Image (cartoon, rainbow, N blue to C red):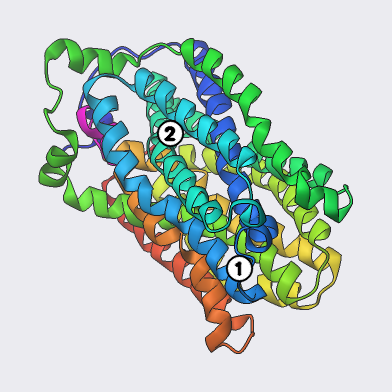
Amino acid sequence: MIRDAETTTRVPQNSAKSARRVAYAALAGTAMEWYDYYLFGLAAALVFNRLYFTTLDPRAASLAAFATFGVGFVARPLGAILFGSIGDRIGRRPALLLSVTLIGAATVCMGLLPDFAAIGVAAPVFLVLLRLVQGVAVGGEWSGAMTIAVEHAPADQRSKLAALVQLSSPIATLLSSGAFTLVLLLPEESFDAWGWRLPFIAALPMLIIALIMRSKIEESPEFARIAEAGTRPRVPFVALFRRAPGRLGIAILVSMLGVGGFYFMNTFLVNFGANERGIDRQIMVNAMLVAAVVQAGVTLWSGRLATRFGPGRVTLWGGLATAVVAFPVFWLVDTQHPVAAIAALSLGLSAVILAYGVAGSALAGLFPTELRYSGVSLGYNLAAVVGGFLPLAAQASLGWSSGGSWGPALLFAAFGLATALGGALAHRVLPRG
């Protein structure tokens, strides 16, 4: 058995002002990292299928691009083990500096990578390798930022500050979608030749800024306490499976919708609207921009709800809401009306974010300090192995649903119900508030 993580260690908490400063620094670095990661999702839907898988028919090329997108998720558990070990053995801070460097470098290299017409089959091979590096880095990024923010926070502010860090997702969506909106204004030939590369190369100055901000984050007081006491596990992920397998399972369920549902919306649904229903791709990208603004508001609201009702219960509500809106989201896109498409992305993403906004505080609360980085990392990223392939599964479902939207809608609803179950289980074991 394992005690509630909130009461496993008794350490002096930072002031609310200091904790907020740490949360903002974690937010800034994570926003940059998600920007890099989300760019790949947009490019998979709009670019890679045409420029890196040119020998395939359009639907097969989309499948190949989404498969490459999903490869990054397979690498994330490896990153979770690597960075979880660094974070629980050496410290949260060095793990965060390393993860942001890796993903920034990989993203810039993607922007410089020649396409299939230039170097042939080597192009998709190198694209997959760079995506693997991204996946390893992200395997330790979000969990580290969330862990250090929660561990600096006063107990009654943890859900709110964890939700604040979650604003990195809509900020990154706005930046990545906004960048693609601008380059899509170029003539199609210019966009295909060099325009799409600019958002990727822009990751370089963002990486420098993120490293400067990350270097100013202090180590968490809770980690300093266990380091001084000598209670750090020798092999954190082994200790995790031995001491808290049940909580790890709950963490996976809690995370499934946030990981899979988000990429389902901003990758598959964008592609579905543009390529399957003939909606202008610029409209679909603009719809993501609108949805990101809505997402920011829902994220902060979810943190307030979690402070009052508990993150487990809010996760349950988000999962159920997703199951309810799954089919209406696709009915709206099926109309092929621009306003309906914008409403569809905002509606679907709002339901997903109700659960995702509190995922950080829910996962951090499941594990004790000495296993927290590894527990949050593995729970979140094992869910990503399944969730990352949701866009691919949804694309494949169009085959057995004869192009009908009910196939992907059914998959979307199933993910919502899985996370609803995780929220119900988490509510039983998490401390309240």
Provide residue 198's location: percent of width, then percent of height.
73, 37
Which of pointers 1 and 2 lies earlier in the amino acid sequence?
1
Q: Where is residue 229 shown, x and y percent of the image?
A: 13, 13
Q: Is residue 362 left or right of residue 395?
A: left
Label 1 environment density (alpha carbons within 10 Å; few <14, some 14–19, many ≥20): many
Instruction: Give the class, few, some or many, for how many residues have Cα within 10 Å of label 2's Cα (few <14, many ≥20).
Output: many
Q: Label the magenta part by its dominant secondary structure.
A: helix
Amino acid type shown at disc 1: Ser
Q: Residue at x 71, y 77 (%)?
A: 331
Q: Position of residue 395 (x, y in %)?
A: 56, 73
Residue 242 lies in quadrant: top left
Magenta part of the chain = 367-376
Front disc: 1 or 2: 1
**Residue 228 sits inside the magenta stretch:** no
Residue that carries the numbered disc 2 in the rendered image: 141
Q: Quadrant of residue 219?
A: top left
Disc 2 residue type? Glu
Q: Quadrant of the N terminus?
A: top left
Which residue is tagged 1? 62
Element on which disc 2 rests? helix
Tell me what residue is drawn at x 28 percent, y 18 percent.
Answer: 222
